[in-house]
Image (spheres, rainbow, N blue to C red):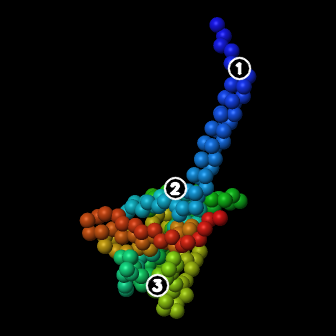
Amino acid sequence: MEIKMKPWKKILLIISAVVLILVLGSGVLLYQFFTSLQPPKIEITENYISTNRDFINGVTIEKITVDSIGGNGLPAKYKVNYVTSCIIDHPKGRPPEPLDKIVFHKKGNYWWIENTADFQYVHKGLGREIVDGKNRLPLSAGLKRLSTCPMEFEREQWYFITIGDPQVTGIFFIIDKNGNNNQYLMPSGVSPI
């Protein structure tokens, strides 16, 4: 026995389904839009750094000596003693393969350079400025390419990590005396749109 539906009920059912699809689709699009406005999620450990986005521009790790701590408990003025950068490989004629994880002591589609440093920063608002008048020397191509990260994180030592994302000034990172990883993302205030 076939159940017959009145034509107006069929139309009402179709309209309800279309409205439901539009509402759900709009909700997904709004969710994606608002999450794209947030800074990336970063996880740093002694062994790797990962993100919910990509490390297209690589990562730079600065080992710092803290001169003063701000009201938020983070370094406010500090001297950079050492810098290492992870550069993402660019295959000839093609853009780099996007990475969401860089393992420090394992070879990958990236390479490292390192250099000593001697310049001071002070954090002001959402950014940081050089305070000792020295220009930061760019890490140049003349430095030796290393296949793995040349440094080890030390306990109770502060680091400042930049990830090449315009929404992030950087991340303060320290491993406390108990071996717990502590990271503090410093947003830049730059909108991605």
The amino acid on which the numbered mark 1 sits, given as a three-letter code, is Lys
The amino acid on which the numbered mark 2 sits, given as a three-letter code, is Asn
Alpha carbons under labels 3 and 2: distance apart: 29 Å
Q: Position of residue 92 (x, y in %)?
A: 68, 60
Q: Position of residue 81 (x, y in %)?
A: 42, 81
Q: What SS does tag 2 mark?
A: loop
Q: What SS does tag 1 mark?
A: loop
Residue drawn where x is 44% and y is 78% of the image: 82
Visible residue check, residue 117: no
Q: Is residue 135 left or right of residue 49?
A: right
Q: Earlier in the sequence, mark 1 or mark 3?
A: 1
Residue drawn where x is 57% and y is 52% of the image: 31
Q: Residues within 10 Å of mark 1 (few under 14, many from 20)?
A: few
Q: Quadrant of the C terminus?
A: bottom right
**Residue 6: assigned label:** 1
Q: Is residue 83 left or right of residue 93?
A: left
Which one is nearer the viewer's eye here, 24 or 125? 24
Q: What SS does tag 3 mark?
A: strand
Q: Residues within 10 Å of mark 2 (few under 14, many from 20)?
A: few
Question: What residue would you read off at disc 3?
Answer: 122
Q: Indicate whether 162 appears above or below 110.
A: below
Q: Is residue 82 left or right of residue 100?
A: left
Q: Indicate whether 193 appears above or below 5.
A: below
Question: What residue would you read off at disc 2?
Answer: 52
Which one is nearer the viewer's eye here, 115 or 169? 169
| Residue 141 falls in image quadrant | bottom right
Q: Earlier in the sequence, mark 3 or mark 2?
A: 2
Alpha carbons under labels 1 and 3: distance apart: 74 Å
Which one is nearer the viewer's eye here, 39 or 81? 39
